[in-house]
Image: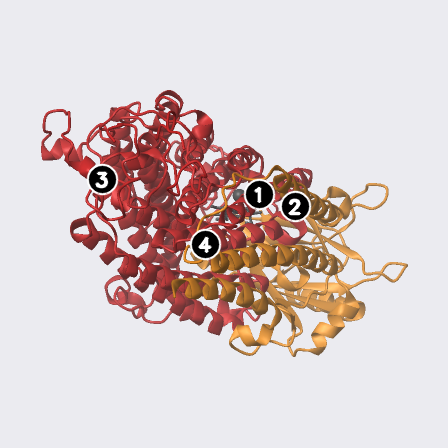
Chain colours: A red, B orange
Amino acid sequence: MVDIHAPHGSEARPGMGEPGTTREHHDHHELGFIQKYIFSVDHKVIGIQFMITGLIFFALGGLFAMAIRYQLAWPWEKMPVIGSVLFPNTGQAITPEFYTMLFTMHGTIMIFFVIIPLLTGAFGNYLIPLMIGAPDMAFPKLNMFGYWTMIPAIFCVFMAFIQPGGGPAAGWTAYPPLSTVTSAAPGSLSAQTWWLMALTWVGVSSMMGAVNYVTTIVKMRAPGMTMFRMPLTIWALFIAALLQLFALPVLTAASAMQICDRMLGTGFFTPTNLVVNQFNPETAGAAAGGQPLLWQHLFWFYSHPAVYIMVVPAMGLASDILSVHARKPVFGYKPMVYSMASIAGLGFIVWGHHMFASGMNPALGMTFMVATIMIALPSAIKVFNWLGTLWGSRIHLTSPMLFALGFVAMFIIGGLSGIWMAATPVDIYIHDTYIVVAHFHYVVFGGSVFAIFAAIYHWFPKMFGRMMNETLGKLHFVGTFIFTNGVFYMMHQLGMAGLMRRTADPYDYETYAHLQPLNEFITISAFLLFAWQIFFVWNFFHSMFWGKRVGRNPWRAASIEWDTPSPPGHGNFDAPLRVYRGPYEYASPEVEEDFVAQSRDLTGKSE
Amino acid sequence: MMRLLTTIMLLALLVFGLWSWVDYDYWLLGPSPAHYTWWWPEEFSTIGQDIDSLFYLIAVMVAVMFVITMGGLVLFTWKYSAKRQDKAVFSHGSHKLELLWTAVPAGLLLIIAFSQMSTFAEIQFASATQDEEGNDLPVHCEIWASQFDWRFRYPGKDGRFGTNDDFESPYELVLPLQENEEGDAKKLVFLLRSRDVLHSFFVPHLRFKRDAVPGMTQRIWLGIDDKQMEEVLATREEKSFDIICAELCGWGHYKMSGRVRVLPQDQYEAWVDEMTAQQFGNS
Ligand code: HEM
Ligand SMILES: [Cu+2]
Ligand SMILES: [Cu+2]
């Protein structure tokens, strides 16, 4: 069979050497190391750069979490390892200022330097051209700048740590006046300005990425790749990019306003006659007459859509992985697309649910409540369709599949707890308690991070031409699943008991005194969860160089990225490409194999 | 092997997930205080009961959804293994099912949404601190938040603010038990203010929370259910309850505490006398 459209993987068994890889690259001159791997304009290299950067920051953000957990289990006790270096004056115990810095930077790093870069930066870059059949992004240079603007962002974050007074400490939400008035907290000296600049640079990076993704998806699909033949991953990344495009300008403007308040003496967020710690900004020539709530509106106008930027791509990845490894078409493809779109649409009119207790006009709270409760509907539809996909399927419990199943389980929990918080009278009690912490960790850690792990296991063979070790992958899943629930599930109950988040030492309160044993349990689970990731780290780096070599399509998947060699060369596809059908033709009665690749031409094939 | 293990793990999440809500003492890993019912502190405000029952209403629906979806996941993971199935069902979906699982949750969610409204209005709408004619109810005291303490300014014996018998109670908010003609607890209205950054006035036992926003004065109200309170007080030696700051306000946020104490009318008046004497000398 010399048909160039034939799916190369359909004959190849998993792990088998593959004839296609020997095909010569009708190619471009050799690039130097620097151009090829450092200042690369190749979307695949940029994607992997984002991935490695994101994973390094994941480790850093994780370390911060460990320090937070240590303090919550054993408040003010000698901090192992870092105690003697950082806190010589307090008997090696953490200081309260340091604690506020820890959770501020934990949140900031996880959201802006880990989840968003991993999902949109790494998988957005890597997968979009490959899955729609394009040789590269629409604007490869812009794409390269997208990665390299992360470097000033990283620089700003590191500068923020070494400012006098320590790192930023106003929370990842940076509510003024705590964040704007320098006398309010040591972290609100120059550190906060560096924090704001870091955020702005991350925004520039995301913006360049988003412009690229939207353009590429709209303009550069292979012949035959209609919008409704795109894999859900691509739909998800498309929708997330649109969210970025519409929401991000608001955050950028808001950060600029906060920088102005801090440095130029404007008073967007500073009310009149404010005296913080015996200091009135007006006496230093600053303007006032502003409104602290204005920041909250602007911030959440971005940051609520941002939580969907963090989960919609994860939904797409999980949908694809479930379908491939369950050998069954995605159930309700179009409802899946529409529900993601309506999550995104509704996502713009629910930001006020973070402000039910803020003093915002309660009539507004009422409307935000209805919109928020209704956003649970598309989430529910997605869960039902994932279950529909699994129904009657043939599940292969590979590492990517396990993490994708884990994703569904976690998203169920995270989605359901959202309903309590959306209900205003109930939220008045649970707002800013550990229920909120449980909720967003179920969606962001259980959801997004599990999907990221699934996607890494799934696309690693494409990225590096080698498999990750399956046994280690499964081991990684088992521990991660158990300890994740060990860490986050009982936080719901802590929240019911009223435990506030961002509290360095809760046990002096009568209300919280009995919660310490449970917190110790959570902390121990967290340490185990953190340590368990060694299986992943080892597997990832070891497999990169010594993993088993694979052919083009080790998972026998139907979407077109598997038509390329593993790893794909510059320009991606080594043969002309045409798409004939949707991406999920598994178990199709049309053919004998259990899937029909998107690019396979069945015309003239009669049986 | 992996199939069994995965199914068990998912099933365990389903079972423990439900059980941990039910069996309070077991999962807390330690003794729970007597003034707790179920997972939360016993409430004694006039609105607390409504809030709690809304929570339980949602809890029932959430539990049903949780069992259906997690149950499905457990079942399918077990049942549809590649080892036991020759070929998957070739299906791209079902219009009927989509309609079903759009319409039913939509209905349930709307029920949830609409059932919240009257309680929320009662808590936060401006009318909640006004009488029938729309006049503002008199203010009991002003609550001032600042880094890192709570201060409560009382109008003093004349009941008017800005006169020279106003006094201030640091740390402790003292409330009288007052009833109206029908014998119901009277609403106590407060002005909530911040001197510096954001704070949040949180009383877990009263199910109340509101941010104190600098530059903004908020009228809030609390109502004490005296019977309910007697029951709670009977379970404990402490006669007052925690006030906690619920909005990050700086390094000392964790220790920005206060207490709230409720006294019968006569004892309350004695307390006012005492505070006045303390702050102005005996005159
Ligand atoms: C079923 C859909 C969801 C509903 C109804 C919902 C509802 C809510 C509500 C009402 C809050 C505010 C709670 C409070 O502060 O009192 C909240 C917080 C939060 N949600 Fe969700 N949510 C949903 C899904 C998600 C998803 C998918 C994500 C992320 C991927 C997410 C991430 C967050 C985060 C990060 C916060 C906390 C922000 C902070 O205060 O730092 N939520 N959610
Ligand atoms: Cu939100
Ligand atoms: Cu505070």
Q: Which of marks 2 and 4 is nearer the N terminus?
A: 4
- Horizontal arrangement in the rendering, residue A403 relative to residue A9 (left or right): right
Closer to us: mark 3 or mark 4?
4
SS of the residue under disc 1: helix
Q: Residue B263, position in %: x, y? A: 74, 69
Which residue position is annotated with label 3? A566
Which one is nearer the viewer's eye here, A86 or A165? A86
Tag 2 and tag 4, C-beta contact below 8 Å: no
Q: In which quarter of the image is residue B246?
A: bottom right
Closer to us: mark 3 or mark 1?
3
Which residue position is annotated with label 1? A381
Closer to us: mark 1 or mark 4?
4
Q: Residue A113, position in %: x, y? A: 33, 44
Which residue position is annotated with label 4? B85
Q: Is mark 3 within 8 Å of ligand 1?
A: no
Q: Does label 1 lie on the same chain as label 2? A: no
- Horizontal arrangement in the rendering, residue A391 relative to residue A605 (left or right): right
Chain ID, mark 1: A
Tag 3 and tag 4, C-beta contact below 8 Å: no
Tag 3 and tag 1, C-beta contact below 8 Å: no
Q: Which amino acid, by three-letter code, is at mark 4?
A: Gln
Residue A42, placed above or below residue A455: above
Which residue position is annotated with label 2? B105
Tag 2 and tag 1, C-beta contact below 8 Å: yes
Q: Which amino acid, by three-letter code, is at mark 3?
A: Ser
Residue at the image position 63 percent from the left and 41 percent from the top: A374
Question: Label 2, label 1: how many angstroms apart (C-alpha)?
Answer: 9 Å
Q: Which amino acid, by three-letter code, is at mark 2?
A: Pro
Closer to us: mark 3 or mark 2?
3
Q: Residue A503, position in %: x, y? A: 47, 60
Location of the C terminus of chain A (image quadrant):
top left
Chain ID, mark 3: A
